Amino acid sequence: MSETPQLDELEKGPWPSFVTEMKRAAEKKDSAKDLINQLERSYEDRVGHWKHGGIVGVKGYGGGVIGRYSDLPAEFPAVSEFHTLRVNQPSGWFYTTDILRQLCEVWDKHGSGLTNMHGATGDIILLGAPTSALQPAFDDLAEIGFDLGGSGSDMRTPSCCVGPGRCEYACIDTLDFLYDITMQYQNELHRPMFPYKSKIKVSGCPNDCVAAVPRSDIAILGTWRDNIQVDQAAVAQYAAEGMDISGEVVALCPTKCMVYDAAARTLTIDDKECNRCMHCLNLMSKALRIGKERGATILVGGKAPIVHGAMLSHVIVPFMKLEPPYTEFKELLEKIWDWWDENGKMRERLGELINRLGMRNFLKAVDLEPLPQMIKVPRANPYYFWDQEEVK
Amino acid sequence: MSETPQLDELEKGPWPSFVTEMKRAAEKKDSAKDLINQLERSYEDRVGHWKHGGIVGVKGYGGGVIGRYSDLPAEFPAVSEFHTLRVNQPSGWFYTTDILRQLCEVWDKHGSGLTNMHGATGDIILLGAPTSALQPAFDDLAEIGFDLGGSGSDMRTPSCCVGPGRCEYACIDTLDFLYDITMQYQNELHRPMFPYKSKIKVSGCPNDCVAAVPRSDIAILGTWRDNIQVDQAAVAQYAAEGMDISGEVVALCPTKCMVYDAAARTLTIDDKECNRCMHCLNLMSKALRIGKERGATILVGGKAPIVHGAMLSHVIVPFMKLEPPYTEFKELLEKIWDWWDENGKMRERLGELINRLGMRNFLKAVDLEPLPQMIKVPRANPYYFWDQEEVK
Amino acid sequence: MPVMDVLGSAISVDEDGFLEDPDVWSEALAEAIAKMEDVDVLTEDHWKVVNYLRDYYKQFGIAPMIRKLCKDTGFQLKTIYELFPSGPAKGACKIAGLPKPTGCV
Amino acid sequence: MPVMDVLGSAISVDEDGFLEDPDVWSEALAEAIAKMEDVDVLTEDHWKVVNYLRDYYKQFGIAPMIRKLCKDTGFQLKTIYELFPSGPAKGACKIAGLPKPTGCV
Amino acid sequence: MSTKTDFGPPNYKELLPPVIEKNYGQWKYHERLQPGLLRHVADSGDEIYTVRVGSPRLVSTDWIKDMCAIADEYCGGYLRFTSRHNLEFLVSDKSKVEPLIAHLKAMGLPVGGTGHAISNPVHTQGWIHCHTPATDASGIVKSVMDDLYEYFVDMKLPAYCRISLACCLNMCGAVHCSDIAILGIHRKPPKVNHEIVQAKCEIPNVIAACPTGAIRPDPKNKSLVVNEDRCMYCGNCYTMCPGMPVADPVGDGVSIWVGGKISSARTPPKFSRLVIPFLPNNPPRWPEVTSAVRNIVEVWASHAHKHERMGEWIDRIGWERFFDLSGIPFEVQLIDDFTMASDTFRSTPTFKW
Amino acid sequence: MSTKTDFGPPNYKELLPPVIEKNYGQWKYHERLQPGLLRHVADSGDEIYTVRVGSPRLVSTDWIKDMCAIADEYCGGYLRFTSRHNLEFLVSDKSKVEPLIAHLKAMGLPVGGTGHAISNPVHTQGWIHCHTPATDASGIVKSVMDDLYEYFVDMKLPAYCRISLACCLNMCGAVHCSDIAILGIHRKPPKVNHEIVQAKCEIPNVIAACPTGAIRPDPKNKSLVVNEDRCMYCGNCYTMCPGMPVADPVGDGVSIWVGGKISSARTPPKFSRLVIPFLPNNPPRWPEVTSAVRNIVEVWASHAHKHERMGEWIDRIGWERFFDLSGIPFEVQLIDDFTMASDTFRSTPTFKW
Ligand code: SRM
Ligand code: SRM
Ligand code: SRM
Ligand code: SRM
Ligand code: SF4
Ligand code: SF4
Ligand code: SF4
Ligand code: SF4
Ligand code: SF4
Ligand code: SF4
Ligand code: SF4
Ligand code: SF4
């Protein structure tokens, strides 16, 4: 009889099975085998079997490795040390088979042969190696050109959507921008020295395919400042093909800034009132195209719920041109980090600090003018501060 | 030259002038005259000239009088003591000329001859009398059947809309209900013993003409549970008179539960989806009528911004029949007061206490089941408590 | 500043008759203030309330909430008003020499 | 529980090599731990960091944030990594005998 | 004489006009025949006419008696006040409606305030009778209504527009849900008067009263210290303690809030939102305030759809567009920084330029 | 050997298929030809086909190598992963599209996840590799996707439906803006292990970590005390200190949240909201969870308008109607009681019965 009856159940069914994958790795690696066994135990016990914490790493870096020790090392000795390497993915998760095979080789040599492609932050997660294998694994990764990503109180591995690589909505060059800032801030990525983690995510347009707004301290979203480009012939074509332009497009436009002339089969957009929500472009990508004056909206402060409740990033720069060498962005980023670094308490994310000290202090510190685009609504409470210098 | 050049300016213009009124009173009363003079001084100085606080009253009552002393008693001796009597208005602010004249007589005898008809809570405000006049004034008021209203940490003078007195939308008998509870809770009105003030306001329907939701700790709003009564002949009549029923009524229905058949001139309402916002009834009062199964929605917790920001009252009972002797309501009210009394800190309003201890504790204490009608949205944070008894 | 003539000496009080200087309070003074608040004699029950208020104030720096006063003294609010017709704040606190209450009793 | 063999005696450490009992820390022990963290000799600069960490911990009950460490010792982060190749948390704190940092350095 | 207590207000039943008594709760519909004139019709076919008149609220007994005389002449001695302090003449005899209105107009009284009008501003005491005001109430209301008179006596606005005023953050006018709210504000921290604090204040209560925790005890002095950087001048400490005055001729003034509503018609109640953080106290006519209010009314009136309240209009067009159309500069004070301020921040790149 | 550091990730430029290099940033439009198959057309007229395949995310190197072999055969050796951990084969040669899809299907791989589908659930480590989980991640995801398979390989839903899972309140899956979020929760306060706290914890940090202020110092013991009534089991204290374990076989389980979204299409991003406070950990297949999720998907799918995301649908019909239609009981835990909870209370009598 199988030793892992519960996990075996999870090999059934149409969706590809992680258990099958673990078993494949287990054929070659004891650690993968013990991982299965320990997981089966967790399924029996209904609790995890990892100890608290773990600080391990490679030379010269303060992050990039997550330490993990089994709390049943006697029973599952091959996972008594089972650390994870976070490896910085290439922009947009593009790979050649060549480079991927090299990666597999390194991991087959040093680790469990198990990975997450990818982690929720975007890294390649190399799952499980003993302490002694960490430095050698890193050295071999370096050899094939893969560096570590972030962990701890550093800049976390930034990520971006496919953007200009394969998307007609990309208002900014997400791939290049990501690569550029990743290279520029290698020190911030590898040597934790902030109050807490700092995440950057870059989406080419308001569709936000990389979930920057809810999931990053600093979210960069492409946008445009002029008019949506309308190809009326293509509009007519959609109509001819039977699309319900009034019902599916115009009626769902949140600003009601579109008019469709069903007789003439033309679409008119009052671009001044358009908020660039993408809905119409999403539905009619052949007929509608993003504007020509492109750039990014910068939002900050997004994060998960702990400690004060989840936050979404919020607008601090409605529009910024984003062209190499991205100086304007970098200057802003550094001002933001400086202020946070100077004022943040231990484990206080940027958004929490802004809430604690107030947007006005933040804006002042990073030299930004208050603008109505920064808010959904003005304050409803009368508790606002005056610069006593101004009150004379 | 006039001694009050600034106030004189406020006698000009088409809107009736309070300065003119003060001058009329000043012809008979020194205190009114000194009030004008002190106010002119405030207009010069741009600050008020009343001292802090004041505790005065009449025998047997803990509230109903607001003490006020001039901070320039030497200059304006007639307002050195200038207290306000809050007099409980009749339900719906209905008066006969007879009873009003009697009131005027009492006030001409004992006070400044100035009043607010009415105060923001709803009382008749008799503005300005010296300490020595308070008891005699009260005694004379009692003689003509006017009792004092609330002040301090008591039940404040409740108020209600005109309701069944002159409104086709009244789902409850606001006037009778108000009179009944005012009479029932005379002790709570006159002898402050709560943690802070407690306000009750009663509107006959969701139009909330007495601003119960934002302005009272306990708001009672009429509503119905069955269908809007539609008189199709009257609908057709409106159409015939040129009303744009599609544009003004149907298009603005927030639940989109109405269909207007322009050809047949008939209106159909999917009452299950109607949220009783009143918009259609407001516009077509001849054609649409409130349902027949009437009662009230009870909301609690409304208040002004100090200390934690303004709050609107929120639903705790979606529907309660409200018929004399209003036992169900009174039982609930007493449970609410008891809980608040037991748990409230000094100067903590009901809404603030609910926020501090949590709705679930409140609901439990007052024996109400949680219902989705109580919330706009469920919680977005994962910080919820479990009864450890339930976790076994 | 108004003064109150008590037992021959002039005591400063505010317009509402509350002591300007809480330290001048004495039992005799309390008796004198009481008269002005329609309390002819301070009985044992009155003193129970007055002493409770003074003790509470000494300990917490504030006057108690009325509910607490009732609970701790065992008097119903009705009784408090019988004892002090002008009520716990204007009557009892004043007699007890407390500062003028702003939020509570 | 893993043990570390230092100067002949067995010292309990956790899997990451942090002391199980902070009270057993000594300068000699620090030297021994240092070797395992790729620090051959503890120079004056090393001691400056180690002592700073110990003092800070004694005073506040926590390890300092890195920024504070840099500011207060005058070392740039780069220098800290030169001194302690495995970094301030895994290297310096361990040598200083602090509890395993969870949030900070 | 042993005082009678707890007898309560007069019983409304004795104060209702006969037609109301008869048709109580049996009203069928209403019409707004002209500004200030309502006609309510009962199931029985009976009708009652209401003529609404603006009142300065702060009135003399003489004014009340004047109104009584009119009510006797046209209404059989019945009248009422509204929740916004207007006076309503309740006319049972149709033939008296026109003469009544003529009479009132001749007296110079504003007949109106019904329907899509600007009704009487709810307001408060101000320098007339309160100890914490940052501005006057009646003076501003008079100035504003002189200026907006045309909107009271007509029904030419897109929807209801409720203006309210409160003279300090206590917000007795409960202005927090008004289409336009005028709110008196202080802008300087309290100047602690230690002598008064020592003698007259319940120190723990004062500390607890501060919304931002700006007050700490100063046990040495048996007094209090204000952390001025954390104070936002709400005056709640002064409410609790005469030793913490906040009023100041230069610091005090007026702020303007817009977009609130109370009724649930179409959309639920909304809070008003700050749009102008400060205008100076400039008595007797507060010209900065009257022109700011008029500007807001007019921008709304010329852009909103029919039945669209101020807040509904702004929700449709977006706040950025409101600032654009109104020409009101966007200032940093408008950005929330109280508890959970981030809920008011814009978490999307979808906005208008 | 002196280690090389700070050299960064591979340069994406060297990893792009030639057709992308050539048409970089010059894409004109896309089409969804069938579930899992996208066609992007460039201004130049060039086109690229993308075939999307569901992945278990936790994969062996063998799996990666298998995929590489396929990519070599059909895609010239180019492939990518998506932000939701699907694998995308980038096909430049149109004639290889059909054979590729046939090949993948023959291997049993799910081709789909595009458009109005349920794409791959973003998820986390669970019992596989984390120290704070309240549930497993991969096991639930596998069970849920087995059950919802039909929605991955088809595009028959009204709109996008994003399911995410996080195994504790840290929410590494950032599930807080998902159409359906599955969140592991603890339900018991930490059991303080004083010995560990004394030896291993930075006490001030632990105290500061508690969102509700439930932890006080216990200076006598040099340890900590938890006020259990104020604890809501977030586990943040455990993150800071091994002496505060919260995991428990009975206490731990799963909660369900709905209505969040990330994109700004039509409506701004929204948070997910709690609808089922607790379902037990019932491995290996968590049947309570899979059926709860399916119910929600189906109720939405059968009631929403086209293009209407879960949250948009609920906003239109109201939460009370959501509970009604879904048959999910409304429990007291769903009512907010964190900071500023009152913002989530209903301040209007307008709701549906
Ligand atoms: C591996 C990964 C989950 C996964 O399976 O994909 C992960 C795993 C852990 N996360 Fe995370 N987080 C991961 C992405 C996230 C995300 C999503 C994102 O980045 O988009 C979030 C939410 C976004 C955010 O940062 O707010 C996230 C929010 C957290 C938090 C809460 C942070 C907060 O401010 O609220 C913690 C707690 C902490 O840092 O102490 C945390 C902590 C952790 C720790 C280190 C556990 C701990 O308390 O020390 C987990 C290690 C697990 C392990 O043993 O490997 N993780 N974590 C993700 C990183 C992979 C990668 O590098 O690609
Ligand atoms: C007279 C009146 C304003 C008016 O001109 O109409 C008024 C006047 C005062 N109010 Fe008020 N409030 C008046 C209605 C209100 C309302 C409106 C309402 O009741 O609908 C509110 C907002 C609703 C609410 O209660 O939240 C209101 C919220 C306050 C507050 C803030 C309470 C809070 O919890 O935030 C205070 C401060 C306090 O109680 O210490 C306050 C305090 C005061 C005091 C007693 C000043 C003080 O700090 O001691 C004012 C006395 C002025 C005077 O000298 O006469 N007043 N007060 C209103 C009572 C007249 C009446 O009885 O009819
Ligand atoms: C007399 C009065 C009740 C009372 O007991 O005193 C009253 C009476 C009527 N109200 Fe009102 N409302 C009265 C204060 C209010 C208030 C409270 C306030 O302004 O502080 C509100 C909430 C305002 C807000 O939302 O900010 C109010 C919101 C309404 C509405 C909803 C309007 C909207 O679309 O938002 C209606 C419906 C309508 O008029 O279409 C309404 C409808 C009515 C009707 C038509 C009801 C009826 O059939 O008799 C009455 C005549 C309205 C008119 O003025 O044209 N009444 N009404 C109050 C007159 C105040 C005044 O003098 O101006
Ligand atoms: C490949 C990927 C980007 C990447 O760099 O990896 C991607 C690619 C595309 N997205 Fe996306 N989106 C991707 C994640 C996302 C995410 C992030 C997420 O789910 O975590 C979102 C936000 C989801 C949300 O709101 O919760 C996202 C929201 C959209 C939307 C807006 C949908 C809506 O109506 O709310 C569109 C527009 C559309 O499809 O109509 C879109 C459109 C597209 C288009 C059509 C863009 C284009 O022209 O190429 C791409 C194909 C869509 C498709 O799957 O049919 N993409 N897209 C991601 C694929 C994830 C997956 O494997 O399923
Ligand atoms: S975020 Fe915009 S640009 Fe980026 S992949 Fe999605 S739709 Fe394309
Ligand atoms: S992008 Fe959005 S707002 Fe702009 S026209 Fe299209 S649908 Fe309307
Ligand atoms: S609240 Fe309703 S019932 Fe009362 S007066 Fe207004 S419209 Fe009529
Ligand atoms: S009351 Fe409101 S929701 Fe109901 S049908 Fe009328 S307009 Fe629609
Ligand atoms: S708003 Fe403030 S100043 Fe005005 S009456 Fe009320 S408490 Fe007094
Ligand atoms: S004015 Fe308000 S914020 Fe300032 S100290 Fe006083 S209570 Fe605190
Ligand atoms: S969500 Fe919690 S349990 Fe799951 S990986 Fe993240 S930190 Fe660990
Ligand atoms: S589990 Fe969370 S709420 Fe409970 S004590 Fe720990 S940190 Fe506080």
Image: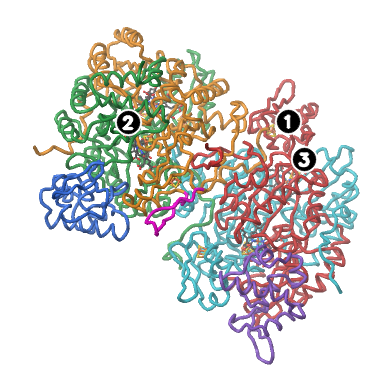
Chain colours: A green, B red, C purple, D blue, E cyan, F orange
Q: Seen in the image, is A258 located left or right of residue D87?
A: right
Where on the picture, by quarter, is residue E68?
Answer: bottom right
Chain of the residue that carries numbered disc 2 in the rendered image: A
- Tell me residue B79's x, y (percent): 70, 76
Chain of the residue that carries numbered disc 3 in the rendered image: B
Ligand 11 visible in quadrant: top left
Q: Are marks 1 and 3 on the same chain?
A: yes
Looking at the rendered structure, the secondary structure element under dot 1 is: loop
Dot 1 or dot 3, earlier in sequence: 1
Instruction: Name the disc covering residue A119, or none.
Output: 2
Q: Is residue F215 magenta?
A: yes
Q: Seen in the image, is F30 located left or right of residue B269?
A: left
Contact check, label 1 and label 3, Cβ < 8 Å? no
Contact check, label 3 and label 2, Cβ < 8 Å? no
The residue carrying mark 1 is B242
- The residue at the point 69 percent across, 41 percent down is B317
From the Cβ of disc 2, is ligand 1 less than 8 Å away?
A: yes
Marks 1 and 3, Cα distance to the nearest angstrom? 39 Å
Marks 1 and 2, Cα distance to the nearest angstrom? 63 Å
Q: Which residue type carries mark 3?
A: Lys
- Tell me residue F229's x, y (percent): 52, 48
From the Cβ of disc 1, is ligand 3 less than 8 Å away?
A: no
Q: Residues within 10 Å of mark 1 (few under 14, many from 20)?
A: few
- The residue at the point 87 percent across, 60 percent down is B97
Q: Residues within 10 Å of mark 3 (few under 14, many from 20)?
A: some
- The residue at the point 30 percent across, 19 percent down is A23
Seen from the viewer's position, the closer of residues A113 and E1 is: A113
Q: Which residue type carries mark 1?
A: Gly
- Tell me residue F5's x, y (percent): 16, 38
Instruction: Name the disc covering residue B321, or none.
Output: 3
Q: Which residue type carries mark 2?
A: Gly
